[in-house]
Amino acid sequence: MTEPNADIIVVGAGLAGLVAAAEAADAGKRVLLLDQEGEQNLGGQAFWSFGGLFLVDSPEQRRLGIRDSRELALSDWMTTAGFDRPEDHWPRQWAQAYVDFAAGEKRSWLAAQGLKLFPVVGWAERGGQGALGPGNSVPRFHITWGTGPGVVEPFERRVRAHLLSGR
């Protein structure tokens, strides 16, 4: 039996795939990144996006007088998702973990990747009944400098650095 060429195989070179590949390679793993598209489509749909990121109780929100909190964001999420079945246990856990990340280390982690934010915050989803209905009850949509390509670039750069180093 021969030794495998990769410790981890990442299927899909969209934003999530690039982040997973970069993090695994940084951890010393040999990564094989596969995608059905050519190299010109690294980052997938994120590359073509407006580059908005969900953050909770950020300095940008506070500067604009937007009163946000982890509790409010989680309440908005849970109300909108309507997790009301036993099989919603894991989606509920994921939502809680993501809101915790968005209210905690996400902003500093993104800054460490080189992402910079515009000093404005907008609405991504307000729900069907405006600010009082399901969806975000306050603006949480933070736009990155460089929009979608600006979000993809740090992770693409990290993946390419590992390719050049032979890892």
Image (cartoon, helix red, strand yellow):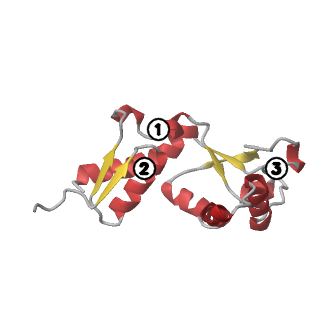
Q: Nearer the viewer, residue 103 or 2?
A: 2
Q: Residue at x 77, y 55 (%)?
A: 61
Q: Which residue bears the numbered disc 1?
A: 44
Q: Quadrant of the C terminus?
A: bottom left
- Left or right of residue 147, residue 27 in this image: left
Q: Residue at x 80, y 61 (%)?
A: 68
Q: Answer with mark 1 or mark 3, whichever residue precedes in sequence.
A: 1
Label of residue 143 in the image: none
Task: Using the numbered discs, state the Cα–Cα distance from disc 1 to disc 3 in whole angstroms.
Answer: 29 Å
Three-letter residue code for mark 3:
Pro
Task: Using the numbered discs, state the Cα–Cα distance from disc 2 to disc 3 in whole angstroms.
Answer: 30 Å
Q: Nearer the viewer, residue 43 or 86?
A: 86
- Left or right of residue 24, residue 50 in this image: right
- Left or right of residue 130, residue 153 in this image: left
Q: Position of residue 58 (x, y in %)?
A: 72, 59
Check whether the beta carbons of the residues at disc 2 and disc 3 lie within 8 A of each other: no
Q: Position of residue 22 (x, y in %)?
A: 39, 56
Q: Position of residue 34 (x, y in %)?
A: 33, 44
Q: Which residue bears the numbered disc 3?
A: 134
User: Considering the numbered disc 2 on the image, is that residue within a helix, a strand or a loop?
Assistant: helix
